[in-house]
Amino acid sequence: VGERRRALAWIVRGLSTALGALYVIPAMRYLGSRRQEERSRAIDVGDLRSLPEGVPQRAPIRAQASDAWSTDVKANAAVFLVRRGDTVRAFDATCPHTGCAVDWDGARFRCPCHQSEFTDDGQRTAGPAPRGLDPQTVEVADGRVHVTYCRYRTGRPDRVRA
Amino acid sequence: MKLLDWIEDRSGYRALVRVALDEPIPGGARAGYVFGSVLLFLFANQATTGLLLAMGYAPSVHDAWASVAYTQEIATLGWFIRGLHSAGASAMIVVLALHLLQVVWAGAYRKPRELTWWVGLALLGVVLAFSLSGYLLPWDQKGYFATQVATSLLGATPGIGTAAREIVQGGASYGNLTLTRFYALHVILLPATIVALIAAHIALFSKNGVTPPTGQENAPTETFYPRQIALDLLAASICAFVLVAWVLRTHGASLEAPADPSSSYEARPEWYFLPLFQLLRFLPGSLETAGALGVPLVAVGLLVALPRMTRSAALSVVALILGGAIGLGAYAKHADARDPAFVAGRDRAERAAEAARLRFRGKLGALAPSDRLALAKALFDDECASCHRLDHGSDRAPPLAHWSSRAWIEAFLESPDSYFGRTDIHAMKPVTKAMVDGEDRAALVEWIWAQAGAEGADAARVTRGQTLFAQLSCGDCHETDGTSDGHGIPNLGGRGSAAWLRAFIADAGAPRFFGKKNGMPRFADKLTDEEIDALVDLVRQERLR
C-alpha cells in the first residue's frame, strides 16, 4: 500500500509540474518578446537660423514610429538645441537621474523632480544626477538641423543605450 | 524547510492543507468525480491566458482589432495563448455539460444539495456571459455582428429592454463605450462574480460531500489524496492535451477582418449559442421575442425546479433540454452548409480576414517576402477591383489583364477609346493598321513597350520605333522626357517602369500623367510605400505574361 501511495504521489507531482510548465513557459516567452524597432535616424528638428545664439531651445523629436500594433508620427522625446555660431549641440531633455524632463530656467538646466542642475553645455553642477545631460548627434545640412536621437539608461554614471 | 516551518508556526497552514487533502470521499475515489476538478483547471486556464491577453489588449474601437492582431501575428506565442483562451472557453461548455449530466445522473442536485445545484446553475450562466462578452473584444466582423444579435435580443425584452441595451452598449449603437463596458464586464465584474460563486460552490460541496452511486454508499471511505487527486490531474492533463492539440491544429483562434458596420456579413454566434440562433430562425417574427427570451427562461426554470422533481422527471427534463439544444445546433450547422449564400459569405469573410492579416503585417514591416504577392492581390481586391480587373476587361477603367504587354499596346493603338471605360479620358486618334502595319507597327509597339524597361527589347526595333513615333506625329501631343506636363495627355517617357507605376499609383492626377482628366483616386495618402511597391510588382507582372 505504501508503495502504491508513493507511485501516486509521483504521478501527482509529475502531472502538476507538466501542467504548470504548459503555462509558465509560453507566458515567459510571450511577455519577453518585444518588437519595437526604434531605428535611430537623423530627424529634422528645425531651421538653424531660427535658433537664438547660446540660448537652449527645446525641440521635439517627431518621427514615424511603430509602437507595438500602431505606427504613427509622434513626438517620442525632446532635445535642447544650443547654437553657437554655425555649430549646434543637442542634449536629451531627459534627466539622467530618474527620467524627469529638465527645463532651461534662463541660466541653467534644472530638473523639477530632484533639483539636479546642469550648465548650458550639459555638465552637472548640483543634485543627485549621476552624470551630465546626454549629448545627441547633430548634423547641419542646407541650414536645417538634424538630430539622431539616442536614449540612454537612467540612474547610472556611464552611458548605456536603453 | 526552515522557512516553511516558520510560516507553519505563524499561520498553521499545514492543517489547512491536511483538511483539503484528507477530505473524505465516502465510497472511494471515482473517475466520475473528475468533472468539477477539470472545470477548475479550465477556469485556471482562462484566468492565466486571459491575464496574458489583457496585457496586450486595448479596448478602443481604434486599437482593439490591431492589438489582438498584434498578439495573434507578431507577439511570440501570442497565437498559442489566444488559442488556449478561445478553445478553453469552448471546452468549458462541454465539460460543464458533462458535469451537469453526471450530477443529474447521480441525483446530486437533491436534498441536501439544492443550494450547490443552484449555485452551479448560476455558474453556468456566468460562463455564458463570459463567452458573450469576450466574443466582442477582438472587434472583428464575427464578434461584432454576432454580438449585435445578442444585444438586439436584449433590447427586445419587454419593459426594461431598451434601457438595458443602452446601458450595456453605452449608447444607442456600438462604439468605444461598448468596448470599454464589455471589457470591464469581462475582466473585472464577471471574474469577481465567478470567483465568489466557485468559492460558494466548493464550500457547499465540501459540507455535503460527494454523492456515491446508489448501492455503493457503504463502500470504504478514501481520502482525496492521493487517488482522487491523481485521477483529477490525469483528467485535467487529458483536457490540456486536447486543448493544445486543437490549438496547434487550428493555429489558435480565428481573427476576422476588423469590424465594418457598413459591410454585409453572415453573422453566426459561437457554436454553443447556435441552438438559440436556430430557434429564432424557426419562429415567425411575431413570436421571436417570446421564443428568444421565453424558451431559455422556461429551460432555466425547469432546471431550478429539478430538486423538487422525481428522478425520472428530472432525467427527462435534462435529456429534453440537452437533446433539444444539440438537435437545434446540429440542424443550424446542416442548414448553413447547404445554403449557398452562407457558404459564399464565409468565403468572402475568410478572404477579407486574410487580406486584413497581410495588410497588418505589411504595415508593421513584418511581412514574409513570400507573402508580398498575396498582399498585393489582397490590396488589389480592396482598393482597385471596384474599377480595374486583372483577369478580364472592365467597363469602368482600363483593363489591366496583360497590361502594357506588346499585345496590349498593339490592341490599344488600334482602338484607344475602348480602353478607358467610363473615364473622362478619350479622343486619342487610333493608330490603325492602315496608317502603320507589319514590321513598322511592331517597331512602334516595341518602342512603347521598352519604355517600361529595355531588358528583353529588340534594340533595332526600338530605334526604328522612335523614328516612327516622330514621323506619325505622336510627339505632337505626347511628351516623352518623363517629366514635362502633358496637359492631360500622358508623358510617355518611362511609361510602365516600376518608378513610373509607383508614381502613377501614388497620384495619377500628376501633370505628367492624366492631369485634370484623371479619375483614379490618389493612393499616396491611403497606402504605405511598401503597399504601393507590392501593387507595382503585381501589375508589372502583366507586361511579361
Image (cartoon, grey):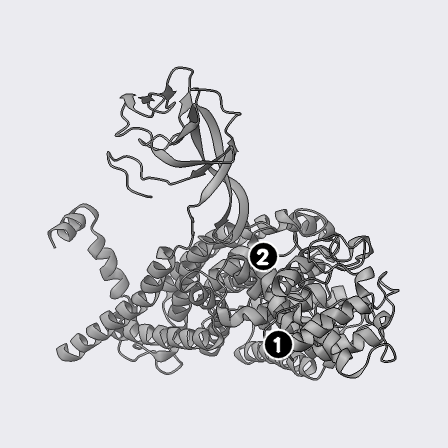
Q: Residue A138 placed where, x, y %?
A: 41, 35
Residue at position x 75%, y 74% from top?
B444
Q: Residue B492 placed where, x, y %?
A: 72, 63
Between tags 2 and 1, which lies in front? 2
Note whether residue A71 is visible: yes
Chain letter belonging to callout 1: B
Q: B447 or B495: which is nearer to us?
A: B447
Residue at position x 37%, y 18% from top?
A108
Kind of residue sitting beneath label 1: Ala
Question: Which disc, if any, is residue B37?
Answer: none
Vertical placement of A66 versus B389: above or below?
above
How packed is label 2: few (under 14 Cα within 10 Å), some, or many (20 or more)?
A: some
Q: Are marks 2 and 1 on the same chain?
A: yes
Question: Which disc, if any, is residue B529?
Answer: 2
Q: Residue A97 placed where, x, y %?
A: 31, 31
Q: B440 or B123: which is nearer to us?
A: B440
Residue at position x 67%, y 52% from top?
B174
Query: Distance between the Cα atoms at labels 2 and 1?
Result: 52 Å
Q: Residue B237 placed where, x, y %?
A: 34, 74
Q: A95 or B269: which is nearer to us?
A: A95
Q: Is residue B3 left or right of residue B270?
A: left
- Nearer-N-terminus badge (2/1): 1
Vertical placement of A111 versus B328: above or below?
above
**Residue pointed to by mark 1:** B325
Q: Is residue B233 left or right of residue B478?
A: left
Q: A95 or A1: which is nearer to us?
A: A95
How packed is label 1: few (under 14 Cα within 10 Å), some, or many (20 or more)?
A: some
